Image (cartoon, grey):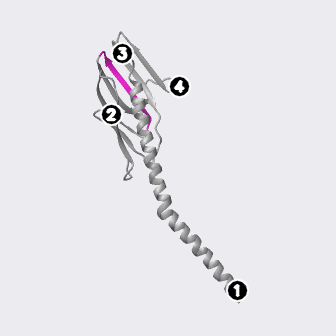
Amino acid sequence: MPAVGKVLEAGIVVLYVGLLTTSLFGGYVTDYRASAGDELADRTLATASHEVRNAVPPAATAARAHVRVDLPGTIRGESYRIEAEGESLVLDHPARGVGGRSRLALPDRVDSVSGSWHSQRPAAVRVEGTGDDLAVRLVAGEAAEDGLSDDGSRRSAGGDGR
């Protein structure tokens, strides 16, 4: 009879561990991952908006800036895109409920914002123009690396357009 008792005890332990694992991975852990992914998407979008805003140089006759932006490689284990839409940045992620939109607070002299970034490629902001006619462009890949200095960023503004 002692063997039967040991088998029952082992069965109860296995059943307890199985139920605990099922409840954690079926509900609590999944909800936490979704919440953490959404929070990371919000922070990424806020950081990207801040970097775009900071890339616009002070008022000058002619301006040119190139600033690298560091983005997380993945959110919730998936790559994503950030696209310029009008005066906003939109984070597009394959997981439902992860993503968002952030309105850019840019000076009036910025006429347009265009381009997109992919999380698996280098990203940068390019600003070019003269006076009250600046264009902001999100660039990725090789275009993001063109013109970068050793520290990974380059900003220049000048009055002669060179």
Q: Position of residue 70 (x, y in %)?
A: 47, 34
Q: CA distance from mark 2 to mark 1?
A: 70 Å
Of label 2 and label 1, which has the lower sequence position?
A: 1
Q: What's the residue type where badge 4 is placed? A: Asp
Circle 4 packing at 10 Å, graded few (<14), some (14-19), many (20+), is: few
Quickly name the residue at label 2: 115
Using the image, tell me which numbered label, if any, was put on residue 3: 1
Quickly name the residue at label 4: 151
Q: CA distance from mark 3 to mark 2?
A: 23 Å
Q: CA distance from mark 3 to mark 4?
A: 24 Å
Of label 3 and label 2, which has the lower sequence position?
A: 3
Quickly name the residue at label 3: 59
Q: Position of residue 68 (x, y in %)?
A: 45, 29
Identify which residue, 13 or 148, lies in the foreground.
13
Of label 3 and label 4, which has the lower sequence position?
A: 3
| Left or right of residue 154: residue 21 | right
SS for dot 3: loop
Q: Quadrant of residue 122?
A: top left
Q: What's the residue type where badge 3 is placed? A: Ala
Q: What's the residue type where badge 1 is placed? A: Ala
- Asked if marks 3 and 4 touch (Cβ < 8 Å), the reply is no
SS for dot 2: strand
The residue mark sitting in front, 3 or 2, is 3
Q: Quadrant of residue 59?
A: top left
x 48%, y 54%: residue: 33
x 35%, y 13%: residue: 60
Of label 1 and label 4, which has the lower sequence position?
A: 1
Circle 2 packing at 10 Å, graded few (<14), some (14-19), many (20+), is: some
Of label 2 and label 4, which has the lower sequence position?
A: 2
